[in-house]
Amino acid sequence: MKTQLICTFTDRRNLSKTAKEITDSFDIVYDKIFILETDDYQQLVCSYNIESNNTIDFLPGSILVHRKKDTNTLYTINALNNLIRAINNGILDISFRIDWEKYKDCLLVTDGESYRKVPTSIFDIVHIKVK
């Protein structure tokens, strides 16, 4: 089974509502939603896997991400490309080796033409009851 990793941004006040929207909208693979806390105390990131298909209706405030398991780094492809350019003299070389330890427990997202490194930590894990 092929899966896609999605991150949906929310805040503490709306966490329960967001988690319900996620479970109502998708069959969550592995029956878990990881709630990540960012360096902005109010902002949370809900990370979850869904079965891959060609048509996904993303929830508002959601992005498709990839994960480097060894360092628990979440990233978008655009952010990864911007990171490579930033540390490789402006050159995008997809074979460039990244020291992932520098981005451990982080979310890498785009910030205009650059990237933004957002430190994360686990705030909670929501275990989905099998329907």
Image (cartoon, helix red, strand yellow):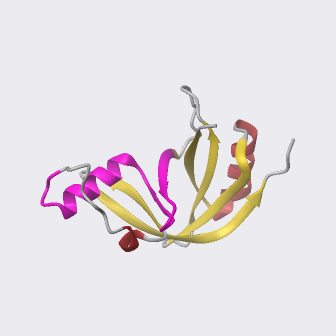
Q: Tell me if residue 111 can be seen.
A: no
Q: Which quarter of the image is occupied by the C terminus?
A: top right
Count of labels in the image:
0
Please say if 3 is above or below 72.
above
- Magenta stretch holds residue 16: no
Please tell me which residue is depicted at 12% across the width and 60% down the height of the picture: 89
Query: Residue 17 at what x, y percent from top left?
Result: 72, 51
Determine whether 83 is above or below 105 in the image. above
- Could you tell me residue 72's position as x and y percent? 51, 65
Name the quarter where the N terminus is drawn. top right
Q: Nearer the viewer, residue 48 or 52?
A: 52
Q: Nearer the viewer, residue 126 or 73?
A: 73
Residue at 38% of width from left, 65% of height from top? Answer: 117
Q: Residues in magenta?
A: 63-91
Q: Percent from the top left, x then y, of residue 78?
A: 33, 47
Please tell me in which quadrant of the rendered image residue 9 appears: bottom right
Q: Is residue 87 visible?
A: yes
Residue pictured at 20% horizontal, 50% vertical: 93
Q: Position of residue 50 (x, y in %)?
A: 64, 41
- Left/right placement of residue 88 relative to residue 106 reads left
Q: Is residue 63 left or right of residue 2?
A: left
Is 66 magenta? The answer is yes
